[in-house]
Image (tube, grey):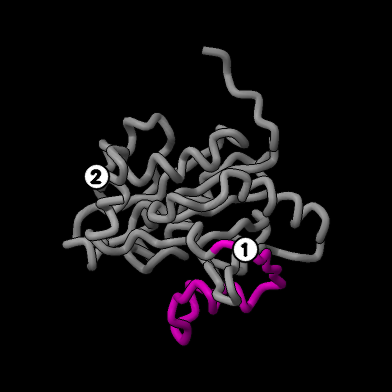
Amino acid sequence: MAKLISPLPSLGAIILAGGQGRRMGYQQKALLRFNKRPLIDYALDKVRPYTDQIVISANEEIKTYEAYSYPVVSDLSEYYQRGPLAGIFSALLTMPEAIEFIQVLPCDTPFIPDTIALSFNNYLLNNPEKELVIASTAGKAHPVIMQCRRSIALKLKAYLDDPRLKNRVMGFIKSCDYGIIEFDDPKEFTNINDLSLLQG
């Protein structure tokens, strides 16, 4: 098979598959099936057209995720199980130097627009002062659906290292110069956080 020639050569992607799934009976949410496919497949579908530099952030079921043939990165020991920011930082450090932008997606939003990575990348290219951009619908922010510049790494480490802070994703975002793209349809950002929603 020919190697993918990325339309966005400076873009990498992190798929967050490390959530504990409390409301899903502590199952690996990313591996639960929705319309006969594991949830993680939908997240991968959103970024594969734009980059082959994809990292899966996960702390369990490592061998299962490795079957996708992408690197699987667990939280660094000092940040283990400290939420999405720990996963983002740990995975970001493994990205090749040529990667300037990082698309972050959770594993549980299968309906997000197929072009979201492109929309975010265009925004950051056109707004060089912005460090990251997030999605919003009807005024509600979706902070783990973001694209950031690689250059936030030092700021993110400082945030994780500050014992006064709560590791909240939106708290970190507010410490950055960030932008928001408002999307029209809230249903596209439905979070599959209940077993009943898996029935499709």
Q: Residue at x 50, y 57 (%)?
A: 188
Q: Amino acid at mark 2?
A: Glu
Segment tinted magenta in the rendering: 159-185
The front one of 162 and 64 is: 64
Task: Classify 167 as above or below 80.
Answer: below
Q: CA distance from mark 2 to mark 1?
A: 36 Å
Q: Is residue 114 shown above or below 77?
A: above
**Badge 2: few (under 14), some or many (20 or more) residues near its Cα, within 10 Å?**
few
- Residue 171 located within the stretch drawn in magenta: yes
Element type at marker 2?
loop
Judged from the image, the secondary structure of the residue bearing numbered disc 1 is loop
Percent across and percent down for residue 97 are 65, 41
Query: Mark number for residue 61?
Result: 2
- Three-letter amino acid code of the residue under disc 1: Asp
- Residue name at image x 56 percent, y 32 percent: 52
Q: Earlier in the sequence, mark 2 or mark 1?
A: 2
Q: Residue at x 50, y 48 (%)?
A: 14
Residue 180 lies in magenta, yes or no? yes
Q: Nearer the viewer, residue 32 or 174?
A: 32
Q: Viewer-nearest of labels 2 and 1?
A: 1
Quadrant of the image occupied by residue 49: top right
Q: Which residue is mark 1?
A: 184
Q: Quadrant of residue 64?
A: top left
Asked if marks 2 and 1 touch (Cβ < 8 Å), the reply is no
